[in-house]
Image: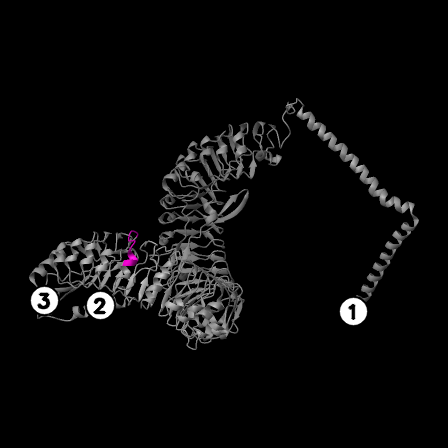
Amino acid sequence: MKTLQYIILLCWVVLLCYPSHAIKCIDGERKALLRFKQGIESDNCGLLSSWGDIEDCCQWRGIRCSNRTGHVIMLHLRGWINVIEFTSGCLEGKLDPSLFELTHLKYLDLSKNGFIQTIPSSIDSLTELEYLNLSSAGFFGEIPPQLGNLSKLASLDLTPQSYEVTFKSLQWMSHLTLLREIHLSDSDLSEATNWFQTINNLPSLKILYLDYCQLPATFPSSSLSYINSSTSLRVISLGGNNFNTTSIFKWLFNMSRNGNQLEYLDLSDNLLSGPVPRSFGKYMYSLSYLYFDDNYFEGSIPITFSNLRALRELSFYNNKLNGPLLNVLQALSCGCANKPLLEHLDLSMNQFWGSIPNTINSFTSIKELYLYDNHLNGTISQSIGQLSMLEILDVFNNSLKATLNHNHFLNLSRLQILDLSANPALVLDSIKILNPYFHLNVIRLRSCKLGPSFPNWLLTQTNFSYLDISNAQISGEIPPSFWTRSLSPNLRYINMSHNMIQGVLPNLSASFDNLKVIDFSSNYFEGSIPSFVGDKNVESVRLNDNTFSDATQLFCPRIANSKLVELDVSNNLLSGRLPNCLMKRDQLQYLHLENNKFTGNIPTSIGDLLQLQYLHLQNNSFSGKLPSSMLNCMSLYFLDLGYNSLTGYIPPSIGNAFEYLAYLNLRGNKFFGKLPLSLCQLSNLHMLDIAMNHISGPIPNCIYNFTAMMSGSKDLQFDNTGVDVGEDYIVGLFKEAAMIEWKREEQRFAGTSLRLVNYIDMSNNELEGEIPDGISNLTKLLSLDLSRNKLTGIIPSNIGQLASLEFLDLSNNHLSGVIPRSLADVSSLAILDLSNNNLSGRIPLGTQLRGFDPSSYMGNPLLCGAPRQGCAGDEPPPAMTINNGTNVTHQEEHGIDTFYLGLYISVVLGFIVGFWGVCGTLVVKRTWRHAFFSFFGDIKDKIYVMVVLNVARIWRKD
């Protein structure tokens, strides 16, 4: 909407390109420009390359002189921004004051450069300036109020790259009566309390951008004068300012009453709440673009919105609006014979419900329709197939219940993006959807019903770059024509996971230079993994949970410079030795090979994966020692080598090499020797499992250095990252998970739950010596298993400091002494096993320890007290007296005796009354006895007759 700015820029560019050789530049201005050049430390784009080579400065790049006077009137030195690294700069250096000697300058553009300084106050000497653009040019600090002296200024753009530019006040702007455009987004206006008054008194203002300026949320009363205010305002953008009051609408409506016919209004990302004002339809009828994203509006869209007949784009993304979708569409359909002009409608992330009704066909101009993340629970009308202009249809994550057929897509020849994902009751009838007219670029049908056979209509789509048909109930084999015809060179993302697809992946000869993500996990694919899967630009490959038997080409790619970051081939039938060619996958960060049948040594090339962060080799048959080269993988967070046949010593320098290690699993191997002292340097460690090995020697006293187990898992770096697959889709990688022996059962932890786990398991080894006192410092420890070792000494007296402990197993050791009293204070303890030790004395009093099964203490013959047998020499509790000297214990015993006496008497009386009250009466009174037995005789006869009749009826039917 920067129309005026673009027009001014175009005019100046035309003048710049227009040759003028009759007038030469003025010598003083030429020297000033050269001094300006000298202040530039680097010119990364060659903007000043022609300066000085030609005598006439009017011929230099970026400069335009007046054809009449020869004065420099335009300086256009716009740079560029690196959007990847978010750095700017063609020109880097200081702004030499000589620039302000160009007093006839009308146009100055230094945007997108790297001047790291404040804006000089002497800029006010450029009194002829009409256009000033210093956006994203590295300027910071407080804006000089001297800018208010540039009385001819029509366009002002000071947009920074961050909140580095501050304004104490905008009062100086009230002198710029010719100002038409203001661009101050991302500046700090938190102290400019009079901003709306200043803006209100600019008679020529047309375009206003004050997004993310931390504007004070105070607004004028109705007494604010609009006499000198603009009547030409067309664009207002105030997003991201935390406005929490709808009084802003009074200000906007008053401006509209004053004659402003707004075309563009953006109030996104504020704190606006309550119902949407009905007055929009009365005062904002000229709006074409309206954005209320990321607010807290409730209720529905008022019917008065039907007056916004010029509306082309409307967005209420991420609010709390609710009600039937039908009501919204009726409110926006103009209520007149004219068809609405709406082209973009975004109602996603609200609480609308119901169906997509027939009314949708009145929006004949609609191009983009976003309804995802609502509560839509009805059907989709076939009239949606009449929206011939529709390019994007997104209803992701609803509860729509419909069977889509050919009519739903009848005239959607322009459709590019189709997202019906996460609607489990949505069925795409493959038989009734034949040869659709569209050629989709993005197809997202995850968790819809497409099967059982592969949908034939997908074979007609040959231009898609994004395909997700995961969890779509597809079974059988994929038609060969899909692999040879449907997959275009534009393919970036393909996901067929969590289906029942069978067969062999073909070794395609086509090149997919743009392919980033391949996910065929959780199917029944078999055979060899073809080479195209690991092409050089692929970043993520997920083939886990299939029956692949050969991955040689995947590990040893035919190309160099592989970009593969994530590789998951776990839970397959891969066997043999892991090829020693991993150095060709040197960008790998995430490697899942667990639950296969790999044998032999871990290849030394594992040490070439310097960026590796997650390594899972669990449950294979790897043998031999750990390669010393593995210590080169210094970025590891996760190292899972459990359940193999690895042997040798745990590397002595493991703590020095793996500074960031959070999870170490060596469980179920054949490691021997002592625990290295360097292990204590793993201060980020949250999970340590060395169970079921042959580790001997003492537990290091420095175990208290596991500081992460003191602070919890808040710093554990298991955050998902992602890969950009185009079309504004970021696909998440690194969904980290682990199988953990938790409370004697193997459980899978993933995501947030994995962050919360802090445990140590050293069970089933040959550890000796005492349990170090320092272990009690690990206050966030949830599980501790030291069972089945040769530990001696006492249980640390301060073990009760482990206040978060849920599982404690110290069984089958040689521990002696008493159970510490502090253990009774650990209220979270759910499983305790101290059996088969040499513990003695009384089990500490308290509900916590007495509540465990006696088996938790068995094998300790000198241990006594509840829940085991009482201790020898236990005396009855001493008698307590009350004020009158009565023995309390005697009173209690007397009360108990009295209670049982009363109970016996009640039972006897109850028997006498109940039994003889009924049976005695029948014995004594003959007529009652006769009636009683006659009644039961009649009941027997009726039941007999009913059974006989029903049996006879069944036989007749047979």
Place residue 4 in its image quadrant.
Answer: bottom left
Q: CA distance from mark 3 to mark 2?
A: 21 Å
CB-based contact (under 8 Å), mark 2 and mark 1? no
In which quadrant will I find the C terminus? bottom right
Dot 3 and dot 2 residues touching (CB under 8 Å): no
Which class describes the residues within 10 Å of circle 2: few (<14), some (14-19), or many (20+)?
A: some
Q: Which residue is mark 2?
A: 8
Viewer-closest of 585 and 763? 763
**Mark number for residue 957?**
1
Going from N to C along the chain, the mark reached first, 3 or 2, is 2
**Toward which corner of the image does residue 559 lie, by quadrant?**
bottom left
Disc 3 marks a residue whose amino acid type is Gly
Magenta range: 190-197
The amino acid type found where label 2 is placed reads Ile
* Residue 612 position (above or below residue 402): above
Q: Nearer the viewer, mark 3 or mark 1?
A: 3
Residue position for label 3: 70
Q: Quick one: label 1, few (<14), some, or many (20+) residues within 10 Å?
A: few
Q: Toward the viewer: 661 or 157?
A: 157
